[in-house]
Amino acid sequence: MGEPAPGFEALRKGCAAAVRGEAGSVSPAAGFAAHGLALAERHRVVPLLAAGLSAAFRERFRRRVLALAQQTARLEQELGFLSRQLAAAGVEFLLCKGPALARQAYPVPEWRTCDDLDLWVASRDFDAAVRALEQAGYRRPQALGARAAACARRAGIEAALVHPDRGRLIEVAHGWRALAPTPRAAREVCAGAVALDIAGAKIRAPAPAHALILACLHGAHHRWDRFSWVADVAGLWLRLSPGEREEVCARARRWRAETALGLGLRLAAEHLGLALGGRAAALAAARRVAALFRRVRLEEIGGAALRVPMMERLRFEKDAQDSALRRLRRMAGWVFTPTLGDIEACALPAALYPLYAVLRPLRLLRHPWWRAGRARTGRT
């Protein structure tokens, strides 16, 4: 176990106070100002932390809080513009994370920062959505030919687009796997979507009860290396009624996401003081959840820490699956589904896309991740 990052305890207390509605109640030690901002930037909680701090300390964060609020406002204006472009193209979409969670999990939307927009569309609308965004001036950072684009679409790879002048990053995902853990879950998310008022437009997003489970799955995907994701879970849970909380636990069972939900709730309970009872407390206390919780170690992530290495993330996400069968399926997806790198390195025609299921494992055997993993286990 490593040492706690300097200032983490003050960051945790400040965010907890804001989430619980006790804004302005935390006064950290004098030395916190020296490294607190960098730590909050790393965990994407600058406005949330500032809200929880006493007035004297909040003033030291004021300029950065204002800059982030302006950045968020510009991004939301862009979202309103894009919603009109997509509507004109006949494309329906869901807004995931970002501005949606800002309104669903926090009493003040500006407390939740975001620097990109995550959109989800049905696979049948994916090409039309990308064309509409390109007509609005967005471009892929790396141009794809027709062959590569067709293969990437079949692999379920999202499209990342950036505006050359405004610099806004838009990520467009498609297919049920990019939205929810099972086809049934994806159908429920789409059917239960709610409309949010953002930048003068009605934007559809997952309902809060659905967004909570999806937030826990997203955190597990990244091995929970950002405190803001824990705050999202706590904020969503606090705004659900007791009946809705029971339904969330039941839905997680149907969606095969009990481990992910239990871990998200445990992190929120341990770091933000979230009170749990009934089925939620049982999920958070499960043996598998306890083992995963010990691997997260948010308190050791300092202001200059890098993101969790890819192989560690993949192992964590695999271990966060509810059953051995789901863990096997997750591993099979990594092994046999090509990445954009595979598609560009091995230029198969789109009609021969199934052959990537053979080429992908062969390329993995030569990947540095594989050699590094064998070295850690002592194999040669």
Image (tube, rainbow, N blue to C red):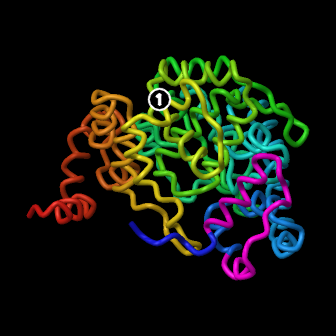
Instruction: Tell me the element at label 1.
Output: helix
Any magenta on residue 13? yes
| Residue 144 x/y as whole percent | 49, 51
Instruction: Identify which residue is drawn at 37% across, 38% down.
Output: 288
For residue 323, which quarter of the picture?
top left
Nearest the eye: 86 or 170: 170
Nearest the eye: 93 or 36: 36
Nearest the eye: 185 or 95: 185
For residue 101, which quarter of the picture?
top right
| Amino acid at dot 1 | Glu
- Return the residue at label 1: 258
Q: Is residue 205 above or below residue 63?
A: above
Q: Is residue 373 above or below residue 340?
A: below
For residue 367, which quarter of the picture?
bottom left
* Residue interval drawn in magenta: 8-35
Left or right of 232 on screen, residue 256: left
